[in-house]
Image (spheres, rainbow, N blue to C red):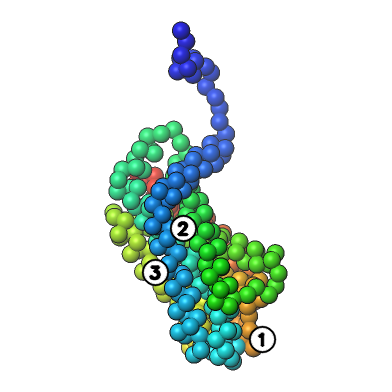
Amino acid sequence: MTTVTDAVSTSAPRTTNPLVQSVRDSLVVARRNLIRMLRIPEVVIFGLVQPIMFVVLFSYVFGGSMNVGGSTDPGLYREFLMAGIFAQTVTFATAGAGAGIADDMHKGLIDRFRSLPMARGAVLTGRTLADLVQTALTVVVLAIVAVLVGWRVHEGLPKALAAFALLLLLGYAFSWIGALIGLSVRTPEAATSGGLIWLFPLTFISNAFVDSNLMTPWLRHIAEWNPFSATVLACRELFGNLPAGYQTPDVWPMQHPVLASVLWSIVIILVFRTLAVRKYRSATA
């Protein structure tokens, strides 16, 4: 009797388009990571707690003392703040991406993937796509909390969705930085530390929490050319959260924040995906 295995072994080999195979393999790996996240719900829960704490603390503790557009109105600062919190949340997911990949490396799972007939970049692409889904879930919950504390969108739903798309694009771009860090260290703990240590200056030397016009000149220039700042300002414009007295800095990224945000994210993806895939090949060789 001819078995299925015999039928497969005697059939002619199928030719698969490399791009189609890469997409298919990436989706399989992404599904595997999503299932893993569902089985460890505390990871998702703890990922939601931190941004909610930032919203509450900055809104009610610092809200009345922040000068935005010449006003110290807490409600005005609350709306000004939210784009920064959203952007910080999607970029802080970088640490989780790096720790997850480092954990897979540490347990030898990457070597098992390497033994399979699959596209090399699919392991990393699948992981970053799964992280993107988790980040999107976090942003949805965070938006609900923001509405509860007084945040509102004033430019309509289409522009708001465009702003969230920019945030997810930035988060996806930064997840490739996390992938590179995860492949470059030996333990998940080191990946978590390495993923956060550079994110704090990146997010705080920006226009996320304060008006960059109030910074000292040298610090203001750094903040204005920070990729993070471009996305934050773009989201504020699309959400309609810029105060009436706000003066947009006279530099190109701040004058064209939406375009600058897209370009910065694309450049980061191209550069760090290339470096991460190259590191993956050498790390598993």
Q: Residue at x 52, y 54 (%)?
A: 133
Q: Is residue 20 left or right of residue 187?
A: right
* Nearer-N-terminus badge (2/1): 2
Inter-mark Cα distance, 1 to 3: 33 Å
Helix or strand or loop: what does disc 2 sit on? helix
Counting from the top left corner in percent of width and height, residue 227 is at 53, 69
Q: Is residue 77 above or below residue 271?
A: below
Q: Which residue is tagged 3?
A: 198
Q: Residue at x 58, y 84 (%)?
A: 75
Counting from the top left corner in percent of width and height, residue 65 is at 49, 90
> In the rendered image, which quarter contains the C terminus?
top left
* Nearer-N-terminus badge (3/2): 2
Q: Amino acid at mark 3?
A: Trp
* Nearer-N-terminus badge (1/3): 3
Q: Residue at x 50, y 85 (%)?
A: 63
Query: For mark 2, does the 10 Å Cα neighbourhood hold few (<14), some (14 to 19), or many (20 or more) residues?
Result: many
Helix or strand or loop: what does disc 1 sit on? loop
Q: Are marks 2 and 1 in contact (CB under 8 Å)?
A: no
Q: Is residue 6 above or below residue 233?
A: above
Q: Is residue 150 above or below residue 134?
A: below
Q: Residue 258 falls in which quadrant of the image?
A: bottom right
Query: For mark 3, does the 10 Å Cα neighbourhood hold few (<14), some (14 to 19), or many (20 or more) residues?
Result: few
The numbered mark at residue 244 is: 1
Inter-mark Cα distance, 2 to 1: 35 Å
Q: Which one is nearer the viewer's eye here, 56 or 230?
A: 56
Query: For mark 1, does the 10 Å Cα neighbourhood hold few (<14), some (14 to 19), or many (20 or more) residues?
Result: few
Residue 273 seen from this side: no
- Count the marks: how many? 3
The numbered mark at residue 175 is: 2
- The mark lying in front, picked from 2 and 1, is 1
Counting from the top left corner in percent of width and height, residue 145 is at 53, 70
Q: Residue at x 70, y 72 (%)?
A: 155
